[in-house]
Amino acid sequence: MRIPELVHFVDGGPLADPAGPPLPVIDPATGREIARGHGATAAVIERALAAAARAQPAWGAMRPVERARILHRAVALIRARAEELARLETLDTGKPIAETRVADWPSGAEALEYFAGLAPTVTGRTIPLGGDMVYTLREPVGLCVGIGAWNYPSQIACWKAAPALALGNAMVFKPSELTPLGAIRLAEILTEAGLPPGVFNVVLGGGDVGAALVTDRRVAKVSLTGSVPTGRRVYAMAAEGIRAVTMELGGKSPLIVFEDADLEDAVGAAMLGNFYSAGQVCSNGTRVFVQEAIAQRFLDRLAERSRAIRLGDPMEESTQMGPLISAAQRDRVLAHLRTALAEGARLVCGGRAPDRPGFFVEPTVLADVTDAMTIAREEVFGPVMSVLTFAGEEEVIARANATEYGLAAGVFTRDLARAHRVVARLEAGTCWINAYNLTPVEAPFGGVKASGVGRENGHAAVEHYTREKSVYLGLGKVEAPF
């Protein structure tokens, strides 16, 4: 496995700039440094934006099928190098190899494939007006900025690049400073596939780099995946320039389990929605509402299955859960656990940081959680599940919606009429019935309330990476009152 050189990727090739602040990359499973680079200076940021602004008009004028051919070649390269890319993602994020083989780059490849196929079908409309008519054009918005998160770095880079590039835009992408390796590799792959220089650029660094990109006058659109506090800052900065924004932010999502649910399926979904990727998934169902009649059976089976999860070296085939991304994130999760226990939550299983290298926390289940507890209100972003109980449908809907967040929600019941009824009233942008955390590229993904604006994926993304131009075509004499 080749670790990419930790340098920026600008105008079709690597760009080193040792004048920037040091940027170490740490293996979360060992705590050891695996790469070191430098954050972008103002000169690097300018070169990236200038390259994208220069390259975009010709790329946008290209026939969509020609753009699609390049993206399809990139998909083929990703799939041909699947094992190498999975191992790189595991090294960068600490996620088990069993996850990265199926969830990270594969999802990114599907996004590139989907939008490559969709792009040639994106057309305008004709609107008859009797004699005259109006026709519309779908045009690229221009220069886009993408800002990624550390939990799914390569998938997020692809999710943002795929619709942007397929629809004729150029992009400057800033990955999380904690997990930059995948974005660099994506830029290399796209270039190898034939993407013209400047169409996709990667600049490294922290929040100061993101701010410089978001506020540049040449930028037409910003797409962010990150926390709610970061989203508020980015939204405000983008608003100064009246820039279009899509944001997929945090969540405190409810997963509602009614008494008639298939217990084994519901327990499995709750675990998937709390322990996959060590709980570092924005849409996780971290508030698990279980109807009182089955609460004890649910907890007993949940504890039994959770205690069997295998923590370990994420490169090992048998490992089911890896570390958190950093020492700071591990300590933050443990602090949340201490607060929850002090406020009256009951520890069912887990709750410790194992005595081993890396940033591990055991899969943890808390019972007797109430809506007022900190653990039920704030996003933890770790392998911590809060189980709450409820009596009836009206009650649980009200409690599920009593949060500033609105990213996702899930319902488990055999009564499909109730499932549809409940989902219709949940204040969430992405919902599941008898499933959880499945995000196919064909389906729009995003939140409401503080969880974000706009949508990733699906045909909905076309609205966010193109603008509609109306053209009035006069076919008769001009009638003027003068």
Image (cartoon, grey):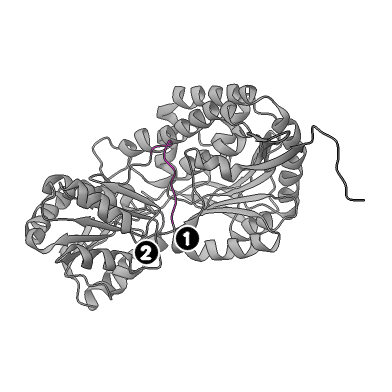
Q: Nearer the viewer, residue 46 or 443?
A: 443
Expressed as whole percent of the image width and height from the top left, the position of residue 123 reads: 61, 31
Dot 2 or dot 1, earlier in sequence: 1
Confirm or deny contact between disc 2 and disc 1 (CB under 8 A): yes
Going 46% across and 35% down the picture, which residue do you hit?
108
With respect to residue 49, does 138 lie above or below?
above
Q: Which residue carries the number 2 mark?
A: 379
Residue 362 in sight here: no
Q: Which residue is mark 1?
A: 227
Residue 95 place in picture, x, y as percent: 35, 44
Horizontal placement of 237 versus 320: left or right?
right
The stretch drawn in magenta includes residue 457: no
The reply, left or right, for residue 448 in relation to residue 470 is left
Q: Which residues are magenta?
A: 440-447
Q: Residues within 10 Å of mark 1 (few under 14, many from 20)?
A: some
Amino acid type, callout 1: Ser
- Magenta stretch: helix, strand or loop mostly: loop
Farthest bottom residue?
Answer: 343
Q: Residue 373 or 479: which is nearer the viewer?
A: 479
The residue carrying pointer 2 sits among few (fewer than 14), some (14 to 19) or many (20 or more) residues within 10 Å by Cα, namely many
- Closer to the camera, 70 or 44? 70
Amino acid at circle 2: Glu
x and y, in percent, of residue 456 in the image: 49, 45
| Residue 373, percent from left and from top | 28, 74
Quarter-of-image position of residue 399: bottom left
Name the quadrant containing residue 371: bottom left
Please tell me whether mark 2 sits on a helix, a strand or a loop.
loop
**Horizontal arrangement in the rendering, residue 96 relative to residue 185 (left or right):** left
Q: Secondary structure at mark 1?
A: loop
Residue 341 in view of the camera: yes
- The residues tagged by marks 2 and 1 sit, at their Cα atoms, a distance apart of 9 Å
